[in-house]
Image: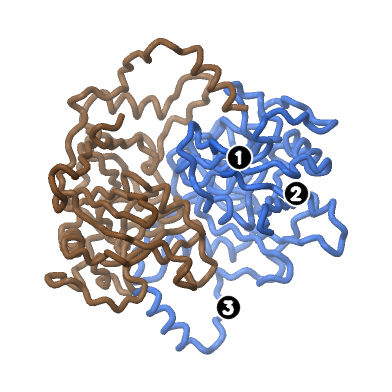
Chain colours: A brown, B blue
Amino acid sequence: MLISLLALLAGVQAAPAPVLPSDAIAADWRPIPDDEVMIITLTGNRSVVIRLAPRFAPEHVANVRTLALAHWWDETSVYRVQENWVTQWGDATEKKPLAPGIVPSPAPEFDIAAFDAAQRLTRRDAYSTVSGVTADGWPIVTDGKAAWMPHCYATVGVARDALPDTGSGAELFTPISGAARRLDRNYTIVGRIIEGMKYMSGMPRSDAALGVYATEAERTGIVSVRLASDMPAAERPRFYYRSTDNPRFAALIRLRENPAAPTIGLGGVDICDLPLATRRAGVK
Amino acid sequence: MLISLLALLAGVQAAPAPVLPSDAIAADWRPIPDDEVMIITLTGNRSVVIRLAPRFAPEHVANVRTLALAHWWDETSVYRVQENWVTQWGDATEKKPLAPGIVPSPAPEFDIAAFDAAQRLTRRDAYSTVSGVTADGWPIVTDGKAAWMPHCYATVGVARDALPDTGSGAELFTPISGAARRLDRNYTIVGRIIEGMKYMSGMPRSDAALGVYATEAERTGIVSVRLASDMPAAERPRFYYRSTDNPRFAALIRLRENPAAPTIGLGGVDICDLPLATRRAGVK
């Protein structure tokens, strides 16, 4: 029913949409460096793109880059999809030797150095006291003592054993629901999925322990994982992020917090539901 | 890696687990009435069970019950799966006449009568000022003036057109990510999925407008929708909810807020990540 009405409205609205104070201008879109863009190609030509966060987890991202440059993930798989929790990928056998140059157990990078928000949110969340977003589009939170990136939907975290310093970056996961905020400050975050999250979230869940597929047949094959900077220049996908240190983004947040009638405004926006945008060059 | 260690620990832990202060006792489990249990059977013998919330949305739940008793949803489908948003089901053609006795446009039941929390949470969330849970296990929030049920993952909401009073209950949706909290106070909630959510969340996303499958072939068929009270007594599944008005549930919340080392505690728990439990009779 909603659908038919929207289709109707779309038909009526033939004129181009006006530019709103909350719309981005060209200068708001800033390039993501090629060595911060990592492309996972799944079987079936499905592509999942990760924006890496070297500023926040330098040692783990260094490992991730080394693994990608070594083509270490080629022919590995997505081997765990646990309902209301995470999708995880890497070497399901846990026996593949890591690439040369990898630090097997870097120190945890759970917290970030500072809470440096270009935009602050007006309402608190359950796990922190202040939340906001960096100028380059990363959600961050603080409890006044420490600061960290929250485990939002589509965040990419480093899987590990029970002890904190046991994740190399070879096994990665992404939250497929909001429940993973519970992992905040307990896992290292190396980036965020900016394209193709639908493939990671839409896979069949496993009822086996921890959601690890009980059979090889259930897994989704990883064809390759590449840094954009490692691809021939002509083939590189290029991405831009929408910067937040400008009045247009601030207006967008205010609009989210207080939408136009007949929508009833809630006066807030969740740190994990910020309208953080990225764009692939050549795609609107 | 996490997995192999847990498997190891499981091998060591041969003795039965001790009863903790946060564990439920038998009396904490209370029956869900049969007319508050609705079973959706999808093709492939997949069953999705909804706990209805007649106390909070009496008119819409009356419609839902009438539709179920009329077997109105039989041979309809899940026709919309929008990434990071919702899965929606009902009559994709939007042309099927509603069952006799249906109120086509009941008044919105976005808000509930009162904030009556058996357990309050210690931290706020982005969309409200106080949150908590009713004795019978429904999450609720308030801004001090109104009270409502939040659009948590697996909540069941009533789809509608742009105007607030345009949802009958024939088209229903469930959030498949945390983003749907934005719908709070704007849609009527009729219940929560307590079993089989993995089927609703794990379906392929559609790139078509609003995530509505562009072709019939993409849809998932609904074989039947039945109230447990409408089934022969011997075939009825019976469900229990874990009550929250007791010190054991309070201890469970405290444990979530302040977990044991080496986990770093966050001092809070999200209203949508409460350990609200239900149980099917005969299943541990």
For mark 3, give the secondary structure. loop
| Closer to the camera in the image, B45 or B134 | B45
Q: In this view, does A245 lie to the left or right of B106?
A: left
Lower sequence index among marks 3 and 1:
3
Residue B115 showing in the rendered view: no
Q: Which residue is drawn at 22% across and 33% down?
A: A243
Q: In which quarter of the image is residue B107?
A: top right
| Label 1 to label 2: alpha-carbon separation | 18 Å
Specify few, some or many for label 1: CA neighbours under 10 Å numbering under 14, 14-19, or 20 or more: few
Q: Residue at x 20, y 24 (%)?
A: A26
Give the amino acid at mark 2: Ser
Q: Which chain carries label 2?
A: B
Return the residue nearer the eye: A71 or A191: A71
Q: Report crowding for label 2: few under 14, some 14 to 19, many 20 or more residues within 10 A (C-alpha).
A: some
Amino acid type, mark 1: Glu
Q: Where is residue A170 in the image (x, y as percent from the top left)?
A: 26, 67
The residue shown at (37%, 57%) is A43
Residue labelled with disc 1: B216
User: Is disc 1 on the same chain as disc 3?
Assistant: yes
Residue position for label 3 = B19
**Foreground mark, 3 or 2?**
2
Mark 1 and mark 2 lie on one chain; the one further toward the N terminus is 1
- Tell which tag, 3 or 1, sits nearer the viewer: 1
Real-space Cα separation, disc 3 to disc 1, in angstroms: 51 Å
Q: Where is residue B136 in the image (x, y as percent from the top left)?
A: 67, 53
Determine contact: label 3, label 2, CB under 8 Å: no
Q: Quadrant of the N terminus of chain B?
A: bottom left
Q: Is residue B191 left or right of residue A229?
A: right
Asked if labels 2 and 1 touch by Cβ distance under 8 angstroms, the answer is no
